[in-house]
Image (spheres, rainbow, N blue to C red):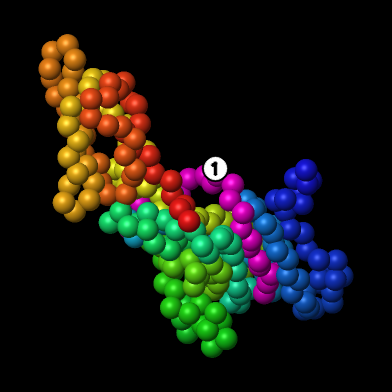
Amino acid sequence: MKDEAEMTGMELDPIASGMSSFGPFGLPSVLGVKSIRGFSRLSVLFRSCPHFHAPSNCNRKTGSALESYEEPGFFIFLFYYDIEVPQAVLPDTVFEAVVRIPYDMQLKQVLANGKKGALNVGAVLILPERFELAPPDRISPEMKEKISNLSFQNYRPTKKNILVIGPVPGKKYSEITFPILSPDPASNKDVHILKYPIYVGGNRGRGQIYPDGNKSNNTVYNATAAGIVSKIIRKEKGGYEITITDALDGHQVVDIIPPGPELLVSEGESIKLDQPLFLLITYIY
């Protein structure tokens, strides 16, 4: 297993450190670049020249998530992705944070209409406070070409250091370039020359729960009552209505399932409370 420091930290390159005392105000004369894989906590030296996609699934429901939650929370699942950032950057400078979200391009996901389609991807980038998305007039033509038509947004109006993107087509945007503007200590006394951490989260495919708490069709649906499956109706536009009848008193409960999940039960079958009725495998060849 790799040393924790190797997995989570990114120190200043020796060449940058060696040069840092020669520039005005101790500015490094070179920009070291490193790539970190997996769950990332990156430390970047901000020497007076200086270093995240959306709750859960980065769906367009992200808008609701931004309104519902003050903070994006913790990253609790480990997916395999890369982030590449400069080791050190100048103040008031635009630089790139490149997030790569690799996956098998042959994989499919279940769409909202129940059909199978290409995977979406997304990312969330949590920067140090006062680092923010670069304004369009500060972004070079070369960087704009890398960004393409991507549209980034702040997690909240008051959280300019937290950026989200997605969902976007994975085949086209498995590599996402964030244009970042570093703060300027000359104009803000709260900005200091330090090493700063960056946190990044990437996702592939749709989520199981929307920000409002409702299930998507990309999850397991369980029986809301115990009893006998007395009727299964396949709806014209996809999905099912499952009628569960209590064997003792005849009370009936109807569970409505959206298009997408695969049926696991049949009429006449005895089921338990919370028994899976439908199962959905997100990635299907």
Stretch in magenta? 63-90
Q: Nearer the viewer, residue 42 or 184?
A: 42
**In this rendering, position of residue 153 left or right of residue 99:** left
Please identify the quarter of the rendering in which residue 226 is found.
top left
**In this rendering, position of residue 140 left or right of residue 205:** right
Relative to 238, say whether 248 is above or below: above
Residue at (66%, 67%) from the top-left corner? Answer: 85
Q: Where is residue 271 in the image (x, y as percent from the top left)?
A: 30, 22
Residue at (70%, 64%) from the top-left corner? Answer: 35
Would you say the magenta stretch is mainly helix, strand or loop?
loop
Relative to 53, say whether 22 is above or below: below
Q: Where is residue 71 in the image (x, y as percent from the top left)?
A: 44, 48
- Residue type, label 1: Ile
Residue 1 within the segment the image draws in magenta: no
Q: Where is residue 155 in the image (x, y as percent from the top left)?
A: 42, 58
**In this rendering, position of residue 39 left or right of residue 274:** right
- Asked whether residue 161 is in view, the answer is no
- Asked whether residue 77 is in view, the answer is yes
Residue 73 within the segment the image draws in magenta: yes
Callout 1: helix, strand or loop? loop
Please give the residue where the numbered disc 1 appears in the rendered image.
Answer: 76
* Residue ranking furthest to the top: 248
Relative to 52, say whether 2 is above or below: above
Q: Which of 252 and 153 is in front in this view?
A: 252
Classed neighbour count for the residue bearing mark 1: other residues with Cα under 10 Å, few (<14), some (14–19), many (≥20): few
* Residue ranking furthest to the bottom: 141
Residue at (56%, 60%) from the top-left corner? Answer: 103
